Image (cartoon, rainbow, N blue to C red):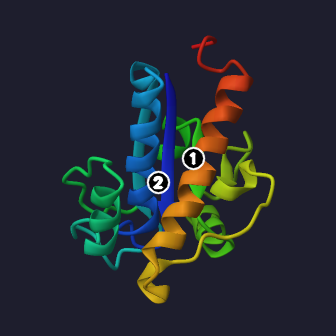
């Protein structure tokens, strides 16, 4: 089973959007039994809060189910539990490394690093633009899924 943890600052916008987009993608490809997908924050600011209404609305508009996720902070112990720990921007990555300490297995990546045009995913908490964030996350999730399937990691587990 491939285990992916998506991480952003507060775990109410980008990482939860990525969690639900990726869950929807693997379901459409009939791979949901091969994946465990979750999300977390680097900060404690939003712990216990629900998915941001802008994220929830955008996912609903795109026909993607959005569960009852509550924001939580990433734990150091999760390094051993997940195969991929995916951040949304450089600041997320820096804060993820503060929590984890080290990355000997190179599990910590940025989502859009799997695409042909690596870049940060803007935080819609500040921009208010959930459409652009969704487009970037969808592009990144599709590229990540392609990377995983091309490297035949699903059949190895």
**Label 2 element class:** helix
Q: Residues within 10 Å of mark 2 (few under 14, many from 20)?
A: many
Q: In this view of the protein, which residue sits in the foreground, 65 or 78? A: 65
Quadrant of the image containing the C terminus: top right
Could you say which disc has been placed on residue 141 in the image? 1
Kindly identify the residue that appears in the image at 50 percent across and 59 percent down.
Answer: 7
Kindly identify the residue that appears in the image at 70 percent across and 49 percent down.
Answer: 103
Q: Are marks 1 and 2 in contact (CB under 8 Å)?
A: yes
Residue 98: image quadrant is bottom right
Instruction: Tell which circle, 1 or 2, labels the residue nearer the N-terminal end.
Output: 2
**Label 1, label 2: how many angstroms apart (C-alpha)?**
7 Å
| 34 over 103 or under it: above or below | above
* Extreme residue in the bottom direction: 126
Left or right of 69, for residue 28:
right
Q: Position of residue 136 (x, y in %)?
A: 59, 62
Q: Position of residue 118 (x, y in %)?
A: 77, 61
| 74 over 67 or under it: above or below | below
Q: Is residue 76 visible?
A: no
Q: Is residue 145 visible?
A: yes
Q: Position of residue 63 (x, y in %)?
A: 31, 49
Where does label 2 land, which residue? 18
């Amino acid at each position: 089973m491939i285990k992916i943890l998506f991480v952003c600052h507060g775990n109410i916008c980008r990482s939860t959007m990525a969690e639900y987009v990726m869950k929807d993608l693997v379901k459409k490809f009939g791979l949901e039994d091969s994946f465990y997908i979750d999300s977390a924050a680097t900060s404690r600011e939003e712990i216990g809060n629900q998915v941001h209404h802008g994220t929830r609305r955008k996912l609903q508009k795109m026909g993607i189910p959005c569960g009852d996720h509550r924001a939580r902070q990433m734990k150091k112990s999760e390094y051993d539990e997940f195969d991929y720990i995916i951040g949304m921007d450089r600041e997320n990555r820096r804060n993820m490394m503060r929590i984890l300490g080290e990355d000997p297995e190179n599990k910590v990546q940025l989502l859009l690093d799997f695409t042909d045009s690596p870049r940060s995913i803007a935080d819609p908490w500040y921009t208010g633009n959930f459409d652009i964030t969704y487009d970037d996350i969808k592009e990144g999730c599709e590229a990540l899924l392609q990377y995983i399937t091309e490297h035949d990691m699903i059949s190895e587990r």
